[in-house]
Image (spheres, rainbow, N blue to C red):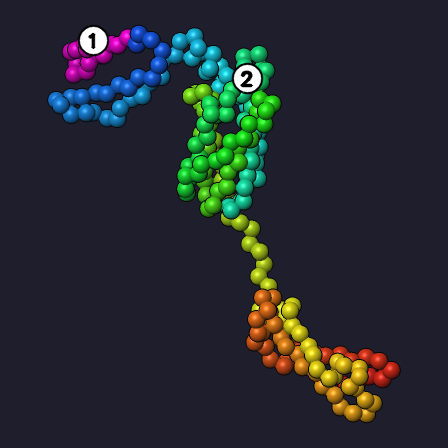
Amino acid sequence: LIFDNGDGSFDVEWTPSIPGSYEVTVVIAGKQVGPVHEIVVTGDEGESKSKVASNTEVSALVDGTYQAGSVSVFSINPKDSDGQPAKIASDKIKVNISGPVSISPEIFDNGDGTFDVEWKPPHPGQYSIGITVDGYSIPNSPFSVDVPAASAVPAKSHKSGSNSEASGPGLDPSKIKVGENTAFTIYPKDEHGGSLDINSEDISVSVTGPTQSKA
């Protein structure tokens, strides 16, 4: 029923006959006004489901440790009105993660009434995590978490020479004779095994023994 309030506004009355999901669309002069309104009408069963959602607890979410590119896990613990684990199937747990990108997390049933949610934020930024149980949002949902960039790993110096090699007769005891010059070759290489572009000033060789020798 639509009632003209006489002030340019109109009241609309409607009666849902049974519990369920309803869509309300407003059309004026043949044109839709605003979005379609989705409304869930509950009965006793719906009230029971909503109580489970309102008693659901989440751990390691807001206080979790996050890093872009790393897997993170938080837990969902649905409870009934008595605070006991509620019997909820995993397909009744919905987690929507949005932010720099949308993420479809994996939900694991632990078999003890709790569920683990595993997700991996690929980029740093602010993420919104919405959680519903049997169609009802849990307290404080959606949650907001800040994911920092991956910790910078200090780059190794291009002159580290960590994989350098040395070989030649000057390192072969069978070819070294007292009073005779000998030599060996150093092959500077970086941490990836590639050639290292350095100067002789970057190389030092110390020879110690019965007498000090110069290299």
Location of mark 2 (residue): 86
Task: Judge by depth and name the residue closer to the eye, 113 or 43.
Answer: 113
In the image, 201: left or right of 105? Answer: right
Residue 157 seen from this side: no
Q: Does residue 4 show up magenta in the picture? A: yes
Q: Residues within 10 Å of mark 2 (few under 14, many from 20)?
A: many
Q: Position of residue 64 (x, y in %)?
A: 57, 36
Q: Which three-letter amino acid code belongs to the residue tagged 2?
A: Ala
In the image, 189: left or right of 103? Answer: right
Task: Find residue 35 and report its image quarter.
Answer: top left
Q: Which three-letter amino acid code belongs to the residue tagged 1?
A: Leu
SS at mark 1? Answer: loop
Q: Residue at x 12, y 22 (%)?
A: 29
Q: Does residue 147 show up magenta in the picture? A: no
Task: Judge by depth and name the residue closer to the eye, 38 or 112.
Answer: 112
Q: Tell me which segment is drawn in magenta.
A: 2-15
The Cα–Cα distance between marks 1 and 2, rounded to whole angstroms, is 41 Å
Location of mark 1 (residue): 1
Quarter containing the N terminus:
top left
Q: Position of residue 93 (x, y in %)?
A: 48, 25
Residue 176 seen from this side: yes
Q: Residue at x 50, y 25 (%)?
A: 90
Quarter containing the C terminus:
bottom right
Q: Are marks 1 and 2 in contact (CB under 8 Å)?
A: no
